[in-house]
Image: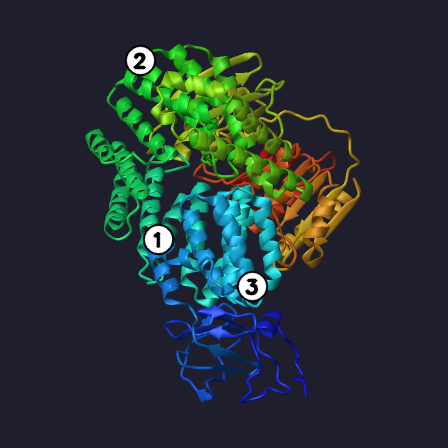
Amino acid sequence: MRPSWKHVSVALLAAFSLSPVRPMLDRTVLAVELSGCAALLFDGTCERPDDGELRVWFAGPPPTSVRVDGVEANVKATAVGSGTRVAVDVRTATSLEIETRSGAASVRLAPSSTPDWAREAARARARGDQETARALATPRLQDPSAAIRARAKGMVARVELASGHVAEAVRLLRESSSEGRSAGRLSEAVDDALALSFALSQRAGDLTAASRELQQLEPWAEPYAEGRARVPYYRALVASALGDVRAAVQLLREARERAGRLGLSRLGWSVRNEWALSLERAGRRSEALAELSDLAATADPAITACDRANALLNVGFATLAQSQEAPGPCRPRVAEAEAAIPWLRASLDLTEKQCRDAHRAAMAHVLLGDAALSAGRPRDAERELADVDLREASSTLRRDALDLEARIALAAGDGTGARSKYERLVALARATGHLDDERRALEGVGQALELQRRPVEAVEAFAAAEALLGPASVLVPIGEAASFQGTRETASRARVELLLRSGRVAEALSVARAARAQVLTSLASVDGVAALSPADRARWALAIKRYRSERRGLDAAGKRDWELATSELREVQHARTEALGRLRASLDSALAALPRSSTPSRAPLSGPDETALFAMTGRSELLLFVSEGDALRAARLPLDARTTPTDVARALARAGAPELDRAAAVRIVTSADLSCVDIHAEPVSSGAPLGLSARVTYGMDLGEEARAPREGRALVISDTRDDLPLARDEGKMIAAHMQGRMPVVHLGGKGAAATAVLDELGRATVFHYAGHARQVDDELVLPLAFTGQLTTSDILALPVSPERVILSACEAGRVRPNGLAVGLGLVQAFLEKGAREVLAPTSPVQDRVALKLAEALAAQTGPLDLGAALAHLGTQPGNDWAVYRIWRR
């Protein structure tokens, strides 16, 4: 008689057998997930863990019975997520049975078959002793047993990968996974297949092959719960390497949840580490630091000394990077360089005593020198550099050491010495085609020339650095170029300051506008990866694969470049012209696969009958350009770490007088690090706020694109989660008002599903959203029905944006206040895709105020006028109209 199963999971069918002691006839089979098995076999047998503890997770409340070899056992039950995890001692058991009120499951157990040599090899690798691990495994490579051969090949493959022999590692991992499957060793075969995907994506740069391996792996890995928990982590590594930051974050969240419910502390640690590094690359350093600090402090025995040493180093690096960010009104200083030193010292101490690694030790010394220099102690920085062993150092470490030497020379006032070192860094970067390294080195050359009082040549050096921002923008999403906006604007700020000092105001404004447009292009490229169609994603992946292949070839060819004189490097660069050309062509192909970005505006800053302000931070001052008709002037204002956003807004409004006093229309463009400054709320000479005495818009400074006229069509979205009655009323009011002017589609509640919204959004000319904006992984999204959401990537994937957009949702217009960004915000994405005007609040807004603004829009009898509606709101007492802004391209 067969059991009458109401539900059987795929994992259960392959991994568990019914207990011969107690048949579970007419019982629902409980879907469980195991972790801790020394190995899981294809026939469902779990080899007992070395420490005897087996962890079992299942959905629902604690079990009613847990029996080991038919005997009731005392277990520790822990609520994890939507279920329960129990830890059971099975060190001598042959069977485990679990019953709950909803079902039952049985697990067959067997002794571990892991040989002593494999255990010792694993311990050697954990302490960084790769050669001992290799010596233990190599004699077993030709063993007649497929299971033994698979173990040996998997171990040697990991040693080869750590030694940089990627092709050999890939070959061995393919064989070990295949032989493990043929030997019935499910868990070992899956683990080797996952290691293969890592080698392909992170070392070979073949992201398509890595994705293919993971897709092929998932069906047969299904019974292995630990493997299923690891798959999203490895998929996240592929997504991150492809530049799809948002997909990577979602996958890491999934992996973290699965690791947590299975009690996989080692995987959980790796996921959290990758999460923290992703936050760091995205500029979210405070969050990254909190995560890394917690990782470094872990006392879990599953986390090795090498892991902790790496985490400590990462905390020190992130702290140092945070301390070096120039503070501003929207980005207060949150760390000092001195705070990085204890973390770096701890990493160095652990490296020297418990986990020797020459590269990590040298990196710690370089970072300690950097911290000392930032803290104003150049002598200490020199001493740290003297302790760096560069004999077998990587090119990256040599670059960082030479860069530190150059900055020490700058701090000492030695412009000649600093320039020599930076010019060598330029030559090294050009010889191997490292565009972002070349850009940073050229900025250093410009600083050295300033120190030598050669401003004309300094401007040329800074211009050369800026010229590399465009070609290097494609490197931002794949993590090979700085994503921090302030870092990418260093050269332009210096160049603008120098031009203003020489009285070249118009040229300085042109440079400032071009630099701002380039930053927006870089940010759009980050979001653009997630918006790619399957065909374009394949093109992008192929271009990135080609780029990384050419990158590895040039890096290998340039391994001994450090031994050459700077003059010889120019000859080497010429000899590598063909390879450098292929590298550049691969970058061009990658850029071509991304959605086309809007072009920067070539029109005058101010239009007819309009006054324009362009404000930006310089290296040590606030810079303002005021344009009115054919007249253009500039002002340089004091700026320090204590300056608040209100101080800046007031200073800019005063510096913009008398033009602002007589203006009927004002356009404001600012650098990203002034995005929190509400200039429109400041009073003019009449005493009224600027935003109520003139029509004020904030500009992206993008060029207007010629578009074919479209028939008017409105899309109204409201109360998508059925929890905001005033938003529901707002939606009805706006939809009714629009009905007489154009066709209207009103989607609310469950009707506002993502597919329906995206389908209509691409056809609408007017879009009104009434609801709440929410922050998900530091990205602002607009919630849709069920669990759907409208993201910047969704907007960038549209064929064209609606012409006018009203986002009646708290903070929907907020831009990252610290001037850092993974990508564009909601408003910027709509403008990037062609919107002419967007109205949104930059901070929380009361529901009644949002409804009042909607009433002002609904009261209009003529064409839709966002400015008039906002002005009307401002005339009514008690309405915080200044939280709103209108943006224009």
Q: Could you tell me if the residues under marks 2 and 3 are in contact, i.e. CB atoms within 8 Å?
A: no
> Is residue 49 positioned above or below 546 on the image?
below
> Is residue 770 positioned above or below 598 on the image?
below
Q: Which residue is mark 2?
A: 452
Residue 375 at x, y percent in the picture: 25, 34
Badge 3 or badge 1: first in the primary sequence: 3
Residue at 38%, 46% in the rendered image: 286
> Is residue 849 positioned above or below 498 on the image?
below
Residue 44 at x, y percent in the picture: 55, 74
Residue 357 at x, y percent in the picture: 30, 46
Question: Of tags 3 and 1, which is closer to the observer?
Answer: 3
Q: Callout 1 environment at 10 Å: few (<14), some (14 to 19), or many (20+)?
A: many
The kind of residue tagged 3 is Arg
Badge 2 or badge 3: first in the primary sequence: 3
Q: Which residue is mark 3?
A: 181
- Examine the rendering and report whether any part of residue 254 can be seen: no
Inter-mark Cα distance, 2 to 3 = 67 Å
Residue at 52%, 66% in the rendered image: 185
- Viewer-nearest residue: 572 or 370: 572
Left or right: 202, with 115 as reference point:
right
